[in-house]
Image (tube, helix red, strand yellow):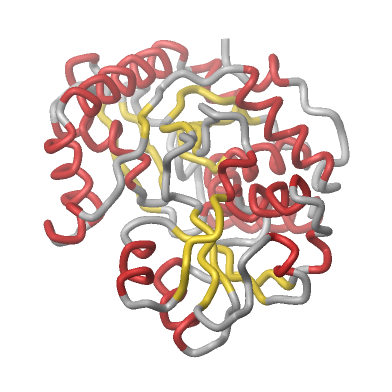
Amino acid sequence: MRMIWTAAILLAAISMTPDAGAQTKIRVGQTPAASLAASYLAQEKGFYAKRGIEVELQVINLNSNVPPALVAGSSDIAGAATTVLLQAIDAGIDLVAVSGTNVTTKESNNSAIIARTGSGISVPADFVGKKVGVPGLGALIHVSLRNWLMQHNVDYKSVNFIEMAFPQQRDALQGGLADAVVTIEPIYSRIIAAGLGKDVGHAFDSLPLGTQTIIYSSTREWANAHRDAVKAFNEANEEGTAYGIAHPDEARAAIATFMKMPPDAVRAIEMPRLEAKVTERDIFSIAEIMTKQEMLHSKIDASKVLFK
């Protein structure tokens, strides 16, 4: 894993030159998701602008590309899945958490585990030997699913995990390419409505409730050199969070705009529980789970991950 991260960073550093422009301009990279509604609202409602920062929202298609983009300087701040952030830190990349996005909830259909109709899967023990589609090997959903299996006394190494993007999951179940998938809304509702599978559990249930899933991060060097901008970004994100909670319809509209989705599809999306605050518990709880899965080579100091 260290060699993969190092190679990715070297390639990114060679091909991209950091922009030493004005401190008030911030390039924010993110993999489009409803979880980032607060940033969409902060941009749309002018919460960034009123604090004197100009934010450019950039699309990073793969979350694993976030750390290389930060190191190369093509993004100043970027939303990284907690597992991606911690793997990068474990590989020696000095990244810090500057703001949060959303937290896990007990009732959420995000991270729903759907067993294909006819797969023979009803309980956790039935996953042994089965093929399960996840939206990224090492991603938080994948790590959470393995933790869910462990909590039910199932060896996750006995399960065959397949990397499968969310849009591919419905067809994979229909074609028998996967026995189960872990998915999110609106794909969840479409699979269930088509009778292609049944809900047998939720991967995020294995995490402590209220755990951050995507964290806005930056290199420690950039954050130290732009403390006022980091402070302004976090405050605007907090205002976007509060606004999204108070105005869910406007949050949905912002999601539709920035994710380029039709209104009907957005109405089917389960709204995330927005939360801008990141705590040591958010870092520690995921690091502990990753350590049990032999994903980390060293102990993560949660207090040093949070930018202060």
Asked if 64 appears above or below 36 in the picture, the reply is below
- 219 or 166: nearer the eye? 166
Residue 238 is left or right of residue 158, and the answer is left
Residue 117 is left or right of residue 195, and the answer is right
Instruction: Indicate the quadrant containing the C terminus: top left, top right, bottom left or bottom right.
Output: top right
Image point (82%, 42%), residue name: 296
Residue 287 is left or right of residue 178, and the answer is right
- 137 or 147: nearer the eye? 147
Q: Quadrant of residue 130?
A: bottom right
Residue 246 is left or right of residue 208, and the answer is left
Q: Quadrant of residue 162?
A: bottom right
Q: Quadrant of residue 118?
A: bottom right
* x then y, percent, for residue 195: 37, 77
Name the residue at the bottom extreme: 175
Asked if 49 appears above or below 93 in the picture, the reply is above
How many tags in the picture? 0
Instruction: Indicate the quadrant containing the N terminus: top left, top right, bottom left or bottom right.
Output: bottom right
Image point (30%, 71%), residue name: 193
Image point (57%, 16%), residue name: 307
* x then y, percent, for residue 300: 78, 27
* x then y, percent, for residue 54: 25, 28
* x then y, percent, for residue 110: 44, 50
Image point (26%, 19%), residue name: 242
